[in-house]
Image (spheres, grey):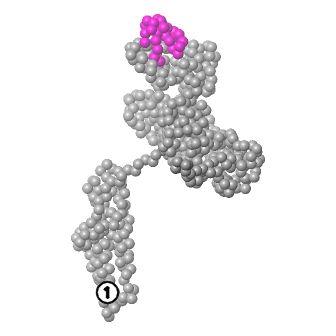
Amino acid sequence: MTKEIKDLNTVNENIASVQNDVNVTKSKSTKKADGSVADVTKNDTVAEKSKSTKKVDANVVGVASNDVVAEKSKSTKKTDENVVDVAKNDSATEKSKATKQADGSVVDVAVKKEKKTSGVGVAKKQGKKKAKKAPKPIIELQNVSKYYGDMPAAKNVTLKIKKGEFVTLLGPSGCGKTTTLRMIAGFETPSEGKVFIDGADVTNVPPHKRPVNTVFQRYALFPHLNVFKNIAFGLKLKRIPDGVIKDKKGNEYEKLRKLTKQEIKAKVENVLKLVDLEGYGHRDVSSLSGGQQQRVAIARALVNEPQVLLLDEPLGALDLKMRQDMQIELMDMHKKLGITFVYVTHDQEEALTMSDTIVVMRHGLIQQIAPPQVIYDEPANVFVADFIGESNIFSGVMLEDYKVEILGHEFECVDKGFKKNEPVDVVIRPEDIYIIPPDIEKSQAKAVVEKCVFKGDHFEIIAYINDLEIIIHETEKWDVGEEIGIFIKPTDMHIMQKSRLANEIITKMIDKNLVDICDEEIECISDLEAETDVKVTIAFDKVIVHDDEEDGKIGGQVVSSIYKGNYYQCIIRADNYYNFFVDTEDDWLKGDRVGLSFNKEDIKIEKIDPERAEKAQAIMEKKI
């Protein structure tokens, strides 16, 4: 009986502990900014209750057991209307531990053990979390430019790359992406700006002293060495720290040594395993396939354990299937190694597949820096929209906020902040256009199918709305000549300001009815005297393009051509580097030499004051 009383006392103490825990839980409600109360419970509460109830001796039966039940029942009674029972406290542990601040942001409330004062739980208020400092970039380019003579290959490139990031420099041939990579590697010295790696200025540091390794497009393997010796080549030249030495004056110097044969063998075998070439060390490199040679080149770069791996179009020489396989392998290597990859390519699919961040370049300038999905869904300009994936690009008019006119119809959109009736460019991806019956209410416009081509996983449908061509990707086949309705969600339209509304040139009059345009005498209609500062304005569709350069007044080269539904918008760079925007029915190929001319009545002349002319000329020259 004495034992039972002792056990019963133990039970009562444990029940009191449970009641105390209940009180602690009650005190843990924190007030939201809007005045409501959110209960913040601790996992510790449940854990402590569980521990306390487990102490009950299983041998206690009869009256003692009944007393336990009675005591438990008493402990769970409410002392006032705001106190909840143990069962409710148990369910409260599942509640969210977030409280909303006045600015609408949500912060996690840390679960802390509460101090007890006189048996009552006192809740601690959590202050705002301190914002973590952004990690320093492992690579930073500050206003870097590279000129070959007067020709800029890269202009004012500013870029930060985080440690462990997979960054792709993407753009057409001649855009400056490889030049930028070579400046990071140290093979090219910037004409302007600075290059930093891991916080150190390496602008003038030679390549072999930088913590980077490069994989070249043509592999650059040694044909007279086998796979093992190709990979080990850099290791044999490498020196590693081996303590310090002192001279007679007591000055300390770092002692360096070569790697031993055993160390070299271990490193080579480890990297061969990484690139899935175990057992290939004795093979001659000329006996390997293109994909295997590429892996050897990557292994040779990785074996030196660089902080950054630079890859200059490494998959360009491989066939499609092998290239796709190597994309997956490179992604896996990046995850395993955790080092920074900087990858150069002109292949949009490669960039979208592998990258954490894409840097789109054109004419030596960065056009956009963003994750792949943002680059695809929200291109910064028409060039990015046209270069990344397939797009419908139309000229439109922003009628008002949330309403745009394209294809001869009004459409709802989610964009605002444009001027009323402002000309805009509208980008719609082919997969975002839905085909529906033409006679239902949701049909926004009617089109006629011109062509339906099977593309493997979808049908590419070319349809016309009046004279405007529209490309649609659908999973079902539609017959040529069939009338269809189209539906476009407001969120699937991407609206951008036009980069230019007309060709404007700041220049001088040569004489009456004669103006200087791109260092050529061009006829116009104006009574202004010679040497008068003027602004020349020529509409895009008033520039005449000649296939024979000699037929034009100004010579130039086609830089780009973008289809806009029923015409092409070309950029033609004159020999003085001014870019003419031209709306034409003809699709001119990039790189074509053409001639340009204008009808004198299509040239608008406006007199401007010399100070304005000087400023405008300086801005134009800077852009050029």
Name the amino acid, label 1.
Answer: Leu
Give above or below for 224 relative to 510.
Answer: below
Residue that numbered label 1 is attached to:
8
- Between residues 137 and 601, which one lies in front from this camera angle? 137
Q: What element carries label 1?
A: helix
Q: Give the range drawn in magenta.
A: 505-533
Give above or below for 39 relative to 154.
Answer: below
- Between residues 345 and 404, which one lies in front from this camera angle? 345
Residue 174 appears in the rendering: yes
Q: Residue furthest front?
A: 248
Quadrant into which the N terminus falls: bottom left
Q: Is residue 108 toward the left or the right of residue 339 in the image? A: left
- Between residues 558 and 163, which one lies in front from this camera angle? 163
Residue 554 image point, x, y percent: 57, 15
Give above or below for 516 relative to 172.
Answer: above
Residue 250 image point, x, y percent: 52, 50
Residue at the location (63% across, 48% down)?
238
